[in-house]
Image (tube, grey):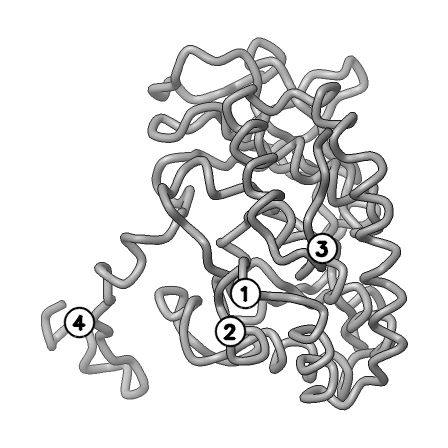
Amino acid sequence: MPKWALNHREQVETVQVDVEHSQGKFSLAGVQMKFSSVKNKNGRFNIGQDANSDSWIIKTPSTVHKYVPYNEYTAMKLAEFVGVNIPEIKLVELKQLDNLPDIQLPNEIHAYAIKRFDRQEGQRVHTEDFAQVFQVYSHEKYKKFNYEQIANALYQYGSQGLKDVQQIARRLLVNILLANGDAHLKNWSLIYPDSKRPMLSPAYDIVSTLPYVEGEQEFALNMAKNKNWYQADMASFETWAKRIGVPWQAIKVHLEETLALARVHWSQMLTELPMHELHQQMLKAHWQNLHHDFRIDCT
């Protein structure tokens, strides 16, 4: 950027983005288009509008990764079943989208739709992701901070501290179980329903990334000084809770309930949800490789 363009802006500096850092991570940025939309009374979605209380984000199929809408829809539904708070979601046929730009799309039928939780009665509700909270650039979303710091910020300053930390614990466990390696700083957010006091927003962007990143086995961020899914166990969560200063028993009960529900129901649910068969097989194999504390029997 030429210096003359910055001369009148004393606080602006150019930033060199570390592109190579993210090449090994799964990211839909640039390969999956997202559009604001409004759901009309006839059930169709009008792309490009965001003017009423029924506002949605539409994610079209990826031109690089196959069957992402089915993967994300399935992962979010599995997460919801075990107690993760999510917005309303849908699979929408592409032909149900009005004013969709003329863009290159793969030969897939459905887009993924998620209702905007940052809208209420047609008005914006303030939100901020944890890259904003910690004041780091988007390209640093995998760096510098960890899951203890996210939870500690909510425990210390949130309007429902312990409840939100318990929800974070569920989500962290679900990310392990679903092989989601992309829960970086920008995929955790605060929401201010009363414009003053923050609380943890509903979950979004939960995807099983393992089918898209060969050999992936890591969290996006450190948890209890560990990033490996297969080394994580109940003791990891106990260490995590102690580092935050949260009573372990208040966390343990939520983890146990999450596991119990997943172990009883997820295998059957997978056969009824639209995740591609190959992705289902990879997820089931992942369950068998987890620490015995978290292993899910598929028989």
Residue 296 percent coordinates (x, y): 71, 43
| Mark 2 and mark 3: Cα distance apart in space | 37 Å
Q: Is label 2 in contact with label 1 (beta carbons under 8 Å)?
A: yes
| Mark 4 and mark 2: Cα distance apart in space | 43 Å
Residue lying at 52% horizontally and 33% vertically, measured from the top left? 282
Mark in the foreground, 3 or 4: 3
| Among numbered discs 3 and 4, the one appearing first in the sequence | 4
| Among numbered discs 4 and 2, the one appearing first in the sequence | 4
Q: Secondary structure at mark 2?
A: strand
Question: Disc 2 marks which residue?
Answer: 226
Looking at the image, which is closer to me, 56 or 41? 56
Amino acid on which disc 4 is placed: Ala
Q: Quadrant of residue 152?
A: bottom right
Mark in the foreground, 4 or 2: 2
Question: Disc 4 marks which residue?
Answer: 5
Q: Secondary structure at mark 4?
A: helix
Mark in the foreground, 1 or 3: 1
Q: Secondary structure at mark 1?
A: helix
Residue lying at 83% horizontally and 80% vertically, measured from the top left? 248
Question: Disc 1 marks which residue?
Answer: 231
Neighbours of disc 1 within 10 Å: few (<14), some (14-19), many (20+) = few
Mark in the foreground, 2 or 1: 1
Residue lying at 81% horizontally and 50% vertically, measured from the top left? 120
Question: Disc 3 marks which residue?
Answer: 124
Amino acid on which disc 1 is placed: Gln
Residue 258 percent coordinates (x, y): 82, 53
